[in-house]
Image: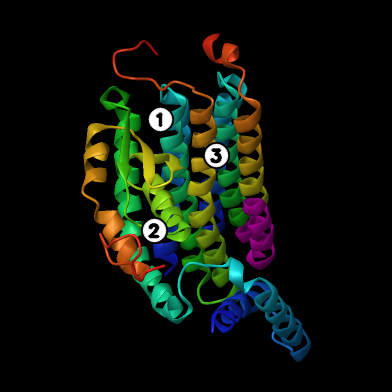
Amino acid sequence: MSATFFLGASLVILAAVTVSLYRVIRGPSIIDRIVGVNVIGTKTIAVIVLTGHLFGRVEFFVDIALLYALINFVGALALSRYFERKGVDVTSERAR
Amino acid sequence: MTVVGMVLVCGGVFFLVTGAVGLIRFPDIYTRMHAAGKCDTLGSLLVLTGLACHEGLVLASAKLLIVALFILITSPTATHAIARAARRNRIEGWTRGEDR
Amino acid sequence: MRKLFVFVMLFAVWLVLSGHFDPLHLAFGLVCSALVAQCSSKLLLAEVPAPHLPAAAWGAVRFLPWLLYEIFLANLHVVYLVCRPDRLRPQIVRFRTHLRGDVAKVVLGNAITLTPGTITLDIVGDEFIVHAVSDVSAASLQTGEMERRIGRALRQPAGAPPDGSGV
């Protein structure tokens, strides 16, 4: 019963990931894409943990989730710092 | 406790979905970041604590809470870093009355 | 004192993350925590004076439930805005804080980002540049409630002169 529930929950989250993917592909500027990727990363953490429950091994999957959270955070920081210094291509912003 | 966990997970999923919808519905970067930064943080917090409640008093739930705390600290920091990058690049925000 | 505090925190995290309680792993944890505490205890919370650390930690614990409640309210607001995007009224607000020290400013910045419809865009010295998503959120920023609570949690007297005892 609870397995079905958590399976449904992760499927719904995956649907939300698909929706956010639209922003990553379409997003008028690079910053929108970074936000989209960051959002997808956060959702993925939730999915990983729920998957861990489905396999009955939450304690292992939590470590993966922790690592994923770390990489997500460092990645977002690195990307935003990089584009803060380099500058965003504003023409792609206007082109929408 | 199981029921409490399920309710929390349900709420978390709801907020995650709302965050995704807000991400594509809002008109400019800054407002999108509101949806991304807030809804996603609370959503994943609720999913993690809900699962911790569901697991009961085992080591895994303590780990889940540590992940939740980590997200609580890092997610707004990442949002702020991205917002600052947008601002330093002089990306203009949408204001009322403009066309989307 | 500071080293002891950092050591206890590190070792607690080690215990939870390793999950093995046999003597070998405990010894590894003790050695690693002691090493890190010895080398880099100055990096963590460097501005809170050492005798205040336990009180500050307790203050943070008491601050957390209120923050979570505010985050919940903020999310309901965003959900409402997602349903009614025509209620959006984005604006940029600037204000000065009297919190001192990087830790307090980081906590305030993060709390602002998480709570009702506001995102910290930039911090220049004492000035916060905040993006608010609607009029209600911009107004809630002006009350200074959050600043007071953070100041209390980190043992900084609110509105004290810049050379106060807090740092």
- Magenta residues, as a range? A51-70
User: Is there one chain holding both mark 2 and mark 1?
Assistant: no
Q: Quadrant of residue A23?
A: top right
Observer-nearest of C37 and B42: C37
Q: CA distance from mark 3 to mark 2?
A: 32 Å
Question: Which amino acid type is shown beneath numbered disc 3?
Answer: Val
In the image, residue C149 lies at what x, y percent? Answer: 29, 62
Of labels 3 and 2, the one closer to you: 2
Observer-nearest of A1 and C85: C85
Of labels 2 and 1, the one closer to you: 2
Residue at the disc numbered 3: A39
User: Is there one chain holding both mark 3 and mark 2?
Assistant: no
Assign a secondary structure to mark 2: loop
- The chain containing the residue under callout 2 comes to C
Observer-nearest of C52 and C160: C160
Callouts 3 and 2 close, C-beta under 8 Å: no
Question: Residue at the spot x=27%, y=32% of the render?
Answer: C134
- The chain containing the residue under callout 3 comes to A
Q: Considering only vertical position in the picture, is C146 above or below C52?
A: above
Residue at the disc numbered 1: B31
Question: Residue at the spot x=48%, y=78% of the render?
Answer: C50
Is B6 inside the magenta-drawn segment?
Answer: no
Q: Is residue A34 visible?
A: yes
Q: CA distance from mark 2 to mark 1?
A: 29 Å
Q: Is residue A94 left or right of residue C90?
A: right
Of labels 3 and 1, the one closer to you: 1
Quadrant of image for the C terminus of chain C? bottom left
Question: Residue at the spot x=40%, y=48% of the render?
Answer: C114
Q: CA distance from mark 3 to mark 1?
A: 14 Å
- The chain containing the residue under callout 1 comes to B
Residue at the disc numbered 2: C100
